[in-house]
Amino acid sequence: MNVSDFDFELPEDLIAQHPVEPRDTSRLMVVNRQSGKIAHHTFRDLSSLLKKGDVLVLNNTRVIPARLIGEKEGTEVKIEILLLKRLKLDVWEALVKPGKRLKVGQKVSFGHGILVGELREILANGNRKIHFSYSGMFETILDQLGEMPLPPYITAQLEDQERYQTVYAKERGSVAAPTAGLHFTPELLDELQKTGIEIVEILLHVGLGTFRPVKVEDIRDHAMHSEYYRVDAEAAERINRAKLEGRRVIAVGTTAARTLESVGYEGKVVPGEGWTDIFIYPGYSFQVVDVLLTNFHFPKSTLVMLVSALAGRELILKAYETAVQERYRFYSFGDSMLIL
């Protein structure tokens, strides 16, 4: 199966630069896998589109202000460090720009020395291992000095940094938002629960790899990035009960879907935590996820491959073609799709 099988034409002006307000006024395309029908709704219609007893699974990760801009010590050279993954307490895997201007052993000062990062190692994948020195709490300093790591295709300024967080974001650790959840408001979540929808939270810290293109022609040769996940015993028990009772499990976003499938064995969820690099593409047999709520993704991306595995490649490409014709908004701040 080739990467070109998941390509489609996307006009640049359909890439959303700003989030809509209120959050739940975004558009929602509903794709029915059995009938092949495509319908158009508003996101706040969601409670009328789901069934009593459905289980809505949310990824409650929180995006950290992972972009740091400082100066190489002893110079005025500007260095940008983008935190990717915490390896130890004060050691992070990161991207460094410009990478060639910083050698092993050299340091970068942020906030006039409030935070200092030393390049310890250049990793095989080209990322850097950075050790940080500071006084106080790292998270507090990061909130003070860091910037929100918006995706590269968003060039507009984001005035409210919380708009790149879900309203249920809790545990810090992601460098990108689980964007399918950005459409929810507290009021909509309350409405869903009142109509009999069960809400379960799990965790997957989203990495920068979510934006990396597939560079091989045969998608089976693609190496997925790994991301930290956690599914506790209570969440697993509630999901398993729903599966036993024939109720639908609805993953909010590809991150929730990948997490559920990473812990799914013979139709059951096994609680646990660790790192997953699961790659889902057509031919994959879903163990846990019955329904997917997701945004519109990059052409030829692993995310398009995942939704194609659930709904079929031809139906997904038809839905994407329809989205372009109907001028849906794409990517992080764009509109959404419910695959039933």
Image: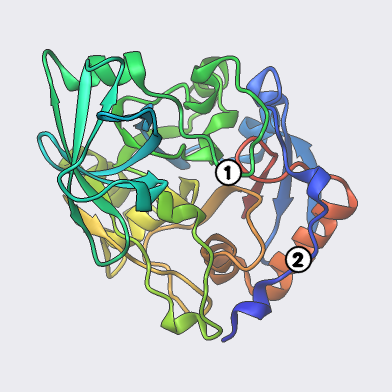
Query: For numbered disc 2, what is the local secondary structure?
Result: loop
When asked about the image quadrant of residue 56, the answer is top left
| Residue where numbered disc 1 is placed | 152
Near-viewer residue (242 or 117) = 117
| Residue 84 vertical position relative to residue 219 in the rendered view, above or below | above
Q: Is residue 284 left or right of residue 140?
A: right
Which residue is depicted at the point 70% across and 59% down? 32
Near-viewer residue (76 or 147) = 76
Which residue is depicted at the point 80% across and 64% down? 9
Residue count near mark 2 (Cα–Cα under 10 Å), binned few <14, some 14–19, many ≥20:
some
Question: Is residue 269 visible to the viewer in this orientation of the structure?
Answer: no
Query: For numbered disc 1, what is the local secondary structure?
Result: loop
When asked about the image quadrant of residue 67, the answer is top left
Mark 2 or 1, which is nearer the eye? 1
Q: Position of residue 312 (x, y in %)?
A: 63, 73
Residue count near mark 1 (Cα–Cα under 10 Å), binned few <14, some 14–19, many ≥20:
few
What color scheme is it? rainbow
Which residue is depicted at the point 64% across and 48% down? 338
Q: Amino acid at mark 2?
A: Gly
| Residue 167 vertical position relative to residue 306 in the rendered view, above or below | above
| Residue where numbered disc 2 is placed | 36
Near-viewer residue (212 or 336) = 212
Q: Amino acid at mark 1?
A: Pro
Q: Is residue 189 left or right of residue 208?
A: right
Q: Position of residue 46 (x, y in %)?
A: 64, 34
* Residue at far right of view: 325
Give the total of numbered labels. Answer: 2
